[in-house]
Each structure stands twice: as structure tokens, then as C-alpha cells.
Image (spheres, coloured by chain):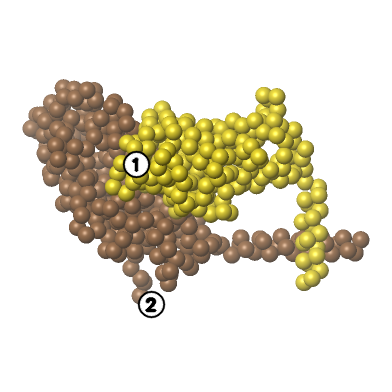
Chain colours: A brown, B yellow
């Protein structure tokens, strides 16, 4: 009997030790705030629960050029917080050694509701999206294995990974999950449009008229409240004969997807110029002009655009006024999203 | 401390005694016809020669059958079989005691559902080089090497097979008649694959699609029970 109880005690002791190991991972869970109208996120947070430590680690990685082959370029090089996480004024984004890529870097926001990533949906999940720019020779030009080795040698990262994920041995999984955690916090939901939805303010007459035009002509693809359906569409752009970018078809090998690109969100478009997958339009009025008089017929052209969109000069102005209500200054100037400066003591 | 260790050992032994499981080991051996091969060595092939440099693939669920009826299935996680490492050429799994079976079906490759989960660790960590960055998804099967038969700059071949999106899903099921045993030896005859591909012109495949699906089916035919 005595022996048995000793055995029992030993078992309890061992379980206690095991529990202690788990308890040492003290993280602070983060609850995201977002409008109910956004619906349930696509991202499965149960597989990567957000914590203060995970998000901060992801933020540090997002801004760290250690992710690139020559330590010059980071995620933020093409996704700047002050311009809604895109590369303003660059039609095609550039990576290491001034190499120019093939696409205009997309803005990053409300990613938890995205069904796919990149202009052609090349990445099917946020967690694995970062692999594309890291491995692209015209972007960060690195290799995941190498990035992890560099992080493991770094004086700070092993302990930061241990704090966030409980192990100092850095894995590809934890690295990518940390990057996701930071990006998932990039929620833009406080534009004038959002404030009007919450009855905190009202649209001007022009904005209101523009809203009506928007709902009639734009909302089927740039659906409220995320201002995208997340689907792919051919919006009638003439093919750039040098880039010859077939968009979604490059990924699916299906001719039905020829010239289809991801429908981008219109939120914060004030900051995200130039526009389109190849950044061919510098100004918003060029975009509107394309939809009213520039549509090129093609077998995969979106059905809504078969006849173009007819707008008077005044309607164009009203529509623009509405689109600018999607500007979320709080998002763009949010200090929690900016370069992580060390706090002074 | 000794006592604690003793108790722990006692606990481990008693747990294993009471559990209704036994080990089943599945070994993989790569061959060129009947010739066992090692990566990095050169072999005669089709009046020329061939060297294999990479042979890696994922295996998933394993189902057990008796007289055509499913008995049970075993699946903990996907396992990466990697011939560059002698420790990664087999899997050892727990199966119920005295399991009576005459056929196993092995899942070759990572299924569509697993892809939806997001990034994973262990053998599925993208750091293992079995993941496409430009068109995200697992590479189910990798075979690389060199042969003067390949008409390209380095005389090299690279077959990276994968893809999970319909209609080009590439995960396969390999069905094998087996004898009841604690160890199952599976032979992967690379010649079966090489005979079906045009090594001269079709030496490089690295993207999902119809061809990847076709090649994946051919790849699954390489797996047979090793005749001793």
C-alpha cells in the first residue's frame, strides 16, 4: 500500500512538472474588435490564437530586413503603414537590388476575411502568403530555411519566439504564424463610411449621391462592408503586352480564369495609388474613366461590365466623394501598426 | 531521485502492457528495377547512366483491409519520407494487437483538406522544402537527379509533383497486398516512373496542373511490396 501511494505521488509529481512547463508560457490573449457586419472571419484563429507577444514578434519581423537575402528589404518596404500598407507611387513594386517585380503591391487590411492572397490568389492561406515574397528573386530573394537560420542566430529572436510560442527553437511554422498574427490585427473599420453606418455622423449631399451610384454600379464586386467579394474578375483592362500577365489563369491553368485578378478592397484608396494589378492608373479619375469608357471586350469580362458604366461628369464627382469616405486615418496612423521603435526608459 | 525514476519506468512498462497496441514498421527502399539505389551514386540506365539526388514524399493515412473489407485506419500526422536521411526512410506506427489484414492502402501526398488548415509544423513545416511559395501548396513527391539522357544544360531532371485544387488534385492512394507481419517492406522502383516520362524532353516539372496529376498517378505505380 505504501509503495503504491509512493508511485501515485511520483506520478502526480511528474504531471506537476509537465504542467509547470506549460504554465511557463505566459502570453496575453488579444481579442480583435471589428464590426459585426464584417461577418465571421475566414481565418481560423483557433489554429493560431492571437497574443500580445505573438503580434509584437510578427510586427518586428514584418519590419525587419533580415527577411531579405541582402538585409535591405523588409515586408514594410512595399507595405508601408502610412499608406495603408502598400507601396505608394510605385506601379510595380521593387525588391532587393532594385529589381522590379511584375505586380503592384496590394494594400493590407482586414485580412482575416480574405479567402485568398496576392492578385492571382497564388496564396490560399494567410499563413503561407509570406513565402511568396520571401522566395521571389525580385522581392526578398531569400529561402525560408535561411531566414530561420538567421533568426536563430540573432541575439533577440530566439527568446522572443520562446515568449510567444514556448520554444526558442525557431520553426517555419512559428515564424509564419507570428507574421500572420501581426497582419491579422490590421483592421480598418473607422472610416467616415463606418462612422455613418454607426450613426455617428452623416454623409454630405455629394457623398450620399455617390453612395447611391456606388451601390448601383460597384457594389456587386466591391461589396460592402469589406468593399470586395474576395473573388477574381476581368475588369476589362487591355493586356499589357510587355508584362503579359494572365492573372488567375497562371495559378489555375483554366482558360475561364484568363485575365482575372483579385478584386481589391476600395478601403483607403486615397492612399493606395497607383491602381490596378500593374499600377497603370495613377489617379482615381483614370480608374473611373476606365470603367466608363475604357472597357475592352473579352470572353472572361465580368458580366456587369459588358456595357461599361455610364456616368455623367457630376456623377463621377459624387462617386469620388463617396469613395474618399472609405479613408481611415486612424488605421493609417495607428502607432501599433508602425515601425516598432524601442521605448525609451 | 532513483525511486522516482524507477516509478516512472514502472509506469511506462505497465502502460505499455495494458495498451492494446503493437508496432508496425513500414520500410521504403528505392530501386532501379531490382537494383537498390542510394542517392548520389551513379547507375547504368537505358544505355546511359543516371544519378538520383533527391527522393522525398509525404505519406498520410494508412488503411488496413481484410478480404476487401476495411478493418481500421491509422493516422497521426503526415510523414515526410526523405532518402537523404537514413532515419527518414521508414515509419513506425501503433496498430491494434493481433490485427488481421491482407491489404494496406497508403495515402501518398497531402490532401486538400489539410491544405486548408494553414501552416503546420513538424514534417509539414514549409522549411522542409516540400512547399511551393509561388502557388501555395505542398509538393507531394520530389525526384531529382542527373542523366546525360536529359537534354538540358546540366543534364538534370526535376519532378516536383503536387497540387490540391480541383480538378488537379494529386494526392494518391497506393493499394498493396501484404502478408501479415510486424515489418512491411515497400519497394519504390524508380524505373517504373522513368519509363513513362520522356527523360529527354520532359525532364522538368514543378507546377500543379493536368500533367502533375498524370505524373502523380504514374509515381504511385512505383510502390510495390518488396519481394525478398
Residue drawn 50% across the image and 43% down it = B57
Residue with the mark numbered 2 = A345
Q: Residue furthest right?
A: A1
Residue drawn 30% across the image and 56% down it = A141
Front-most of A155 and A182? A155
Picture coordinates of residue B51, whole percent (x, y)? 43, 48
Front-most of B161 and A248? B161
Both labels 2 and 1 in a single chain: no
Q: Residue furthest bottom?
A: A345
Residue with the mark numbered 1 = B150
Label 2 – label 1 distance at C-alpha: 64 Å
Label 1 marks a residue whose chain is B
Assess disc 2: are there few (<14), some (14-19) or many (≥20) residues with their C-alpha within 10 Å of its C-alpha: few
Task: Check contact, mark 2 vs mark 1: CB within 8 A.
Answer: no
Which part of the image, by quadrant, shows the N terminus of chain B? bottom right
Q: Residue A19 has which mark?
A: none
Q: Secondary structure at mark 1?
A: loop
Residue A81 visible here: no
Horizontal relation, residue B146 to residue A234: left or right? right
Front-most of B162 and A335? B162
Picture coordinates of residue A135, whole percent (x, y)? 33, 52
Q: Residue furthest front?
A: B47
Marks 2 and 1: which is nearer the front? 1
Label 2 marks a residue whose chain is A
Residue drawn 21% across the image and 28% down it = A217
Determine whether B149 is above or below A83 in the image. Answer: above
Amino acid at each position: 500500500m505504501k509503495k503504491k501511494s509512493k508511485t501515485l505521488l511520483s506520478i502526480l509529481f511528474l504531471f506537476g512538472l509537465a504542467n509547470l512547463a506549460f504554465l511557463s508560457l505566459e502570453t496575453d490573449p488579444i481579442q480583435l474588435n471589428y464590426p459585426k457586419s464584417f461577418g465571421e472571419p475566414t481565418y481560423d484563429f483557433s489554429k493560431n490564437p492571437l497574443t500580445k507577444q505573438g503580434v509584437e514578434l510578427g510586427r518586428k519581423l514584418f519590419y525587419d530586413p533580415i527577411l531579405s537575402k541582402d538585409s535591405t528589404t523588409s515586408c514594410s518596404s512595399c507595405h508601408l503603414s502610412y499608406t495603408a500598407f502598400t507601396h505608394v507611387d510605385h506601379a510595380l513594386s521593387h525588391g532587393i537590388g532594385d529589381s522590379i517585380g511584375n505586380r503592384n503591391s496590394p494594400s493590407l487590411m482586414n485580412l482575416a476575411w480574405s479567402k485568398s492572397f496576392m492578385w492571382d490568389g497564388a496564396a490560399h492561406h494567410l499563413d503561407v502568403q509570406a513565402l511568396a515574397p520571401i522566395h521571389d528573386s525580385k522581392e526578398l530573394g531569400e529561402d525560408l530555411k535561411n531566414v530561420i537560420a538567421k533568426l536563430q542566430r540573432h541575439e533577440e529572436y530566439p527568446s522572443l519566439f520562446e515568449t510567444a510560442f514556448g520554444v526558442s527553437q525557431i520553426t517555419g511554422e512559428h515564424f509564419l504564424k507570428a507574421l500572420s498574427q501581426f497582419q491579422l490585427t490590421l483592421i480598418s473599420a473607422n472610416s467616415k463610411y463606418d462612422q455613418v453606418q454607426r450613426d455617428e455622423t452623416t454623409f454630405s449631399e455629394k457623398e450620399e449621391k455617390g453612395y447611391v451610384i456606388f451601390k448601383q454600379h460597384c457594389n456587386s464586386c466591391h461589396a460592402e462592408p469589406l468593399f470586395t467579394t474576395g473573388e477574381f474578375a476581368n475588369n476589362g483592362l487591355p493586356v499589357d503586352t510587355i508584362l503579359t500577365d494572365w492573372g488567375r489563369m497562371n495559378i489555375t491553368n483554366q482558360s475561364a480564369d484568363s485575365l482575372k485578378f483579385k478584386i481589391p478592397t476600395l478601403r483607403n484608396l486615397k492612399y493606395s495609388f497607383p491602381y490596378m494589378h500593374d499600377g497603370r492608373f495613377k489617379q482615381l479619375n483614370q480608374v473611373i474613366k476606365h470603367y466608363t469608357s475604357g472597357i475592352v471586350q473579352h470572353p472572361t469580362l465580368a458580366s456587369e461590365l459588358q456595357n461599361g458604366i455610364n456616368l455623367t461628369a457630376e456623377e463621377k464627382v459624387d462617386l469620388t466623394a463617396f469613395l474618399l469616405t472609405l479613408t481611415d486615418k486612424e488605421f493609417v496612423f495607428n502607432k501599433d501598426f508602425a515601425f516598432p521603435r524601442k521605448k525609451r526608459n | 531521485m532513483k525511486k522516482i525514476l524507477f516509478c516512472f519506468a514502472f509506469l511506462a512498462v505497465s502502460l505499455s502492457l495494458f495498451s492494446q497496441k503493437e508496432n508496425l514498421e513500414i520500410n521504403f527502399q528505392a530501386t532501379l528495377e531490382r537494383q537498390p539505389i542510394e542517392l548520389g551514386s551513379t547507375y547504368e540506365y537505358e544505355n546511359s547512366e543516371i544519378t538520383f539526388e533527391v527522393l522525398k514524399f509525404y505519406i498520410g493515412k494508412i488503411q488496413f483491409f481484410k478480404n476487401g473489407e476495411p478493418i481500421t485506419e491509422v493516422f497521426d500526422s503526415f510523414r515526410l519520407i526523405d532518402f537523404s536521411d537514413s532515419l527518414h526512410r521508414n515509419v513506425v506506427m501503433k496498430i491494434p494487437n493481433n490485427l488481421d489484414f491482407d491489404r494496406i492502402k497508403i495515402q501518398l501526398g497531402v490532401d486538400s483538406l489539410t491544405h486548408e488548415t494553414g501552416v503546420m509544423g513538424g514534417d509539414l513545416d514549409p522549411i522542409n522544402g516540400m512547399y511551393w511559395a509561388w502557388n501555395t501548396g505542398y509538393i507531394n513527391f520530389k525526384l531529382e537527379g542527373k542523366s546525360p539522357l536529359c537534354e538540358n544544360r546540366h543534364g538534370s531532371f526535376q519532378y516536383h509533383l503536387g497540387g490540391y485544387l480541383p480538378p488537379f488534385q494529386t494526392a494518391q492512394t497506393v493499394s498493396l497486398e501484404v502478408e501479415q507481419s510486424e515489418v512491411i517492406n515497400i519497394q519504390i522502383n524508380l524505373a517504373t516512373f522513368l519509363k513513362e516520362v520522356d527523360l529527354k524532353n520532359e525532364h522538368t516539372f514543378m507546377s500543379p496542373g493536368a500533367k502533375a496529376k498524370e505524373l502523380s498517378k504514374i509515381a504511385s505505380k512505383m510502390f510495390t511490396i518488396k519481394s525478398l
